[in-house]
Image (cartoon, rainbow, N blue to C red):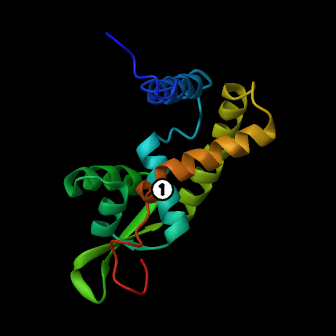
Amino acid sequence: MTSDPTAPATAGTTLALIDHLSRLGRRSAEAHGVPSGLRPRQFVALTVLREQGPVAQQTLASALRLDPSNLVGLLNELEGSGLVVRRRDPGDRRRHIVELAPDGARALEAAEREMACVEDGLLRALSGQEREVLHGLLRRALGDQLPTCAEADPPGGC
């Protein structure tokens, strides 16, 4: 087997490294007993709701790239914990609007503080500037794959 001299040295390994770093981060969070108890999907859903504001349930499913039935389960958990509120859309009674509850905002802030400590430990070999570069590169690599409801809703926003 011959190797392609034009292939980058990292071909095939970058995703493996990102996956390994992610697993280490999850283990570290669990080992530190992150008290917020938010799972990654819950964390992302609450973050989207904080950044986007109230959003149609179907739009949130699209933004999170979740099957609507899986989103219902996620929202049931979040609503049962008082972290989100679902209400009928007054303009279309068939739709539900989901919004971040005050307890959800507090839980998200606590989780962000907790995760910052985990991240500090996980990325301790990088300087602050290197962490900013890494964050920027990851955001750029994700491009339009970041959860957003903008493309799924009509003009006028979420």
24 or 9, which lies in front?
A: 9
* Residue 116 found in image quarter: top right
User: In the figure, 154 relative to 82: above or below?
Assistant: below
Under mark 1, the amino acid is Gly
Q: What is the number of callouts on the image?
A: 1
Residue 86 horizontal side relative to residue 7, left or right: left
* Residue 84 found in image quarter: bottom left
Q: Residue 65, how many percent across, how many down?
A: 31, 54
User: In the figure, 134 relative to 14: above or below?
Assistant: below
The residue at the point 63 percent across, 45 percent down is 135
> Seen from this angle, which residue lies furthest bottom?
91
**Residue linked to disc 1:** 143
The residue at the point 36 percent across, 55 percent down is 64
Give the SS element for disc 1: helix
Q: Residue 115, how many percent across, how many down?
A: 63, 38
Quarter of the rendering occupied by the N terminus: top left
The residue at the point 44 percent across, 73 percent down is 54
Q: Residue 60, how many percent across, how many down?
A: 35, 64
* Residue 33 found in image quarter: top right
1 or 114, which lies in front?
A: 1
Q: Residue 48, how many percent across, how many down?
A: 48, 61
108 or 17, which lies in front?
A: 17
User: In the figure, 17 relative to 155: above or below?
Assistant: above
Q: Neighbour class for label 1 at 10 Å: few (<14), some, many (≥20)?
A: few
The residue at the point 33 percent across, 50 percent down is 74
Quarter of the rendering occupied by the C terminus: bottom left
